Image (tube, helix red, strand yellow):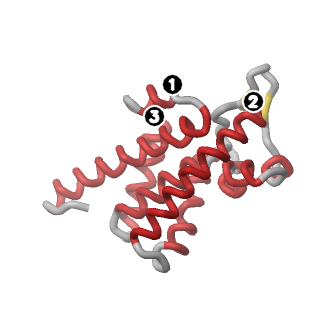
Amino acid sequence: MTTSASGIPIRPTGRFVLSHPAHFIAFGFGSGLMRPAPGTAGTLAALPIYWALAPRLTDLQFLGVIVALFVIGIWACGRTGRALGVPDHGGMVIDEIVAYLLVLFMIPREFLWQAAGFVLFRAFDIVKPTPIRHFDRTVKGGFGVMLDDLLAAFYTLLVLAVWRRAITGGLI
């Protein structure tokens, strides 16, 4: 269980999430309330968003959505972290949503690629290899919350590009 700076257990409720737009966004539109794995639920929440938007938007528009959500996520996570007294509460999953949307945007629109992207992204987000762990520990506030997942997305895309190159000789 997550605790505040004063050691008080923090288990946000639906009421908290709905009490301010920043909390609703930071908690991934409610997906961050899922237990026991809110980060996984947040990552999965990116799929219907991707499936709804990708066919309707140009690549540039979709990237614009990702950038806008990243900036909004910085604000939402900063405000929500302050309200909870926990700068990077596990239920704040807009970072997973935005980062996995970037992965989905960059890989082929096939189930195998999306599944591999999901597994790799979750692994990198959980394990936090260097330098992700460094940035997770040193960069604070809403930007820090969003940054480590962006780096996990980069690692995911790098591994998938190497895999594709090794298997097919092509690039993503």
Mark 3 vs mark 2: which is more N-terminal? 2
Left of 141 or right of it: where is 54? Answer: left
Residue 3, above or below 55: above
Asked which secondary structure carries label 3, the reply is helix
Q: Gap between marks 1 and 2, in whole Å?
A: 17 Å
Q: Name the residue under label 1.
A: 138
Left of 71 or right of it: where is 91? Answer: right
Q: Which of 16 and 109 is in front in this view?
A: 16
Kind of residue sitting beneath label 3 = Val
Asked which secondary structure carries label 2, the reply is loop
Residue 103, above or below 86: below
Which residue in the rendered view is the most extreme toward the top? 6
Q: Nearer the viewer, residue 15 or 114?
A: 15
Q: Gap between marks 3 and 2, in whole Å?
A: 24 Å
- The 10 Å Cα crowd at callout 3, few under 14, some 14 to 19, many 20 or more, is few
Measured from the top left, where is residue 119 in percent x and y?
43, 51
Mark 3 vs mark 1: which is more N-terminal? 3
Q: In which quarter of the image is the C terminus?
A: bottom left
Seen at 72% across and 31% down, the residue is 1
Q: Image quarter for residue 152?
A: top left
Q: Name the residue under label 3.
A: 127
Residue 61, above or below 164: below
Q: Mark 2 points at which residue?
A: 85
- The 10 Å Cα crowd at callout 1, few under 14, some 14 to 19, many 20 or more, is few
- The 10 Å Cα crowd at callout 2, few under 14, some 14 to 19, many 20 or more, is some
Kind of residue sitting beneath label 1 = Thr
- Frontmost of labels 3 and 2 is 2
Q: Nearer the viewer, residue 107 or 57?
A: 57
Measured from the top left, where is residue 11 in percent x and y?
79, 38
Seen at 67% across and 36% down, the residue is 89
